[in-house]
Amino acid sequence: MPCRKQERSIDASATKNHLLLNNFVAMQKRMEHYQKSTERPYLHLVDGGLTDNSGLASLLDMSNLLSMRKLYADLKNYNLRNIIVVNVNAQNERTSDIDKSADIPGIKDVVNTVINVPIDKATESTVLRSQKFADQWNAYAKRKKGTKIKIYFVNLSLKNLPEGQLKNDVLNIGTSFYLPESDVDKLREAARILLEQSKEYHAALKALQ
């Protein structure tokens, strides 16, 4: 029985890897069209936040494509000891008064909700998956002989700031190509506090010393 279970596990893993490879090949073919600059001189881009607001999805895809054993063995060849991933989640949470009125919300409020809610949910899911992968990686590394390769996943979120005026202010900063100097100063202060209170960040710094 154990052999059969192992065979099924290997088959499932092989099928998953095959599908991921097919997706990667399909993506490569789509990108080939954009190499012909004379035929396609313009490229219109959409904010990546619509699909991967944290920028971690591609890393997770790679971890799905290759087994942990394969990844670990490959990285050992580079004499790595520490992998530090710093995820900065600047997701805001602007104060809304639509629940204080019987009036039907305007188009702007509806569009913002339709766009932001799925993005926020996807970001939350990606962060949780990233933390889970880091935990699994470190558990795997503990069982390996010799020098260990440890992952430090530092997750910084404005929502984790201490309650107070600063947290309220930065969560209400809108998305913009330009921020006034006062907002920049508040975000810098928020970053300092988040790093200071992050145990994982301090553990990563200690590992690098």
Image: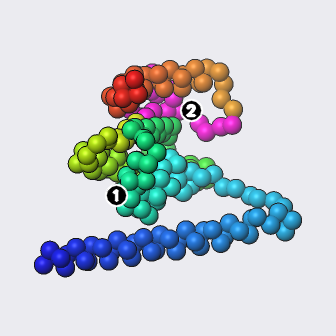
Q: CA distance from mark 1 to mark 2?
A: 43 Å
The front one of 12 and 88 is 12
Q: Nearer the viewer, residue 6 or 51?
A: 6
Residue 168 position in % (x across, y down): 46, 28
Q: What type is the residue that disc 1 sits on? A: Arg
Q: Residue furthest left?
A: 1
Please say whether residue 167 is one of the residues in the magenta stretch. yes
Give the magenta part as a residue range. 155-177
Residue that mark 1 sits on: 69
Find residue 168 and name its label.
none
For residue 174, above or below residue 112: above
Tag 2: residue type?
Ile
Q: What residue would you read off at disc 2?
A: 173
Position in image of residue 1 (x %, y %)? 12, 78
- Left/right of residue 34 with respect to residue 20 in the rendered view: right
**Total marks placed:** 2
- Residue at figure coordinates x 70%, y 56% from the top left: 45
Q: Is residue 129 left or right of residue 142?
A: right
- In the image, residue 14 sits, relative to residue 47, either above or below, namely below
Q: From this viewpoint, is residue 116 visible? A: no
Residue 130 x/y as whole percent = 39, 49
Query: Could you tell me which secondary element the residue under label 1 belongs to?
Result: helix
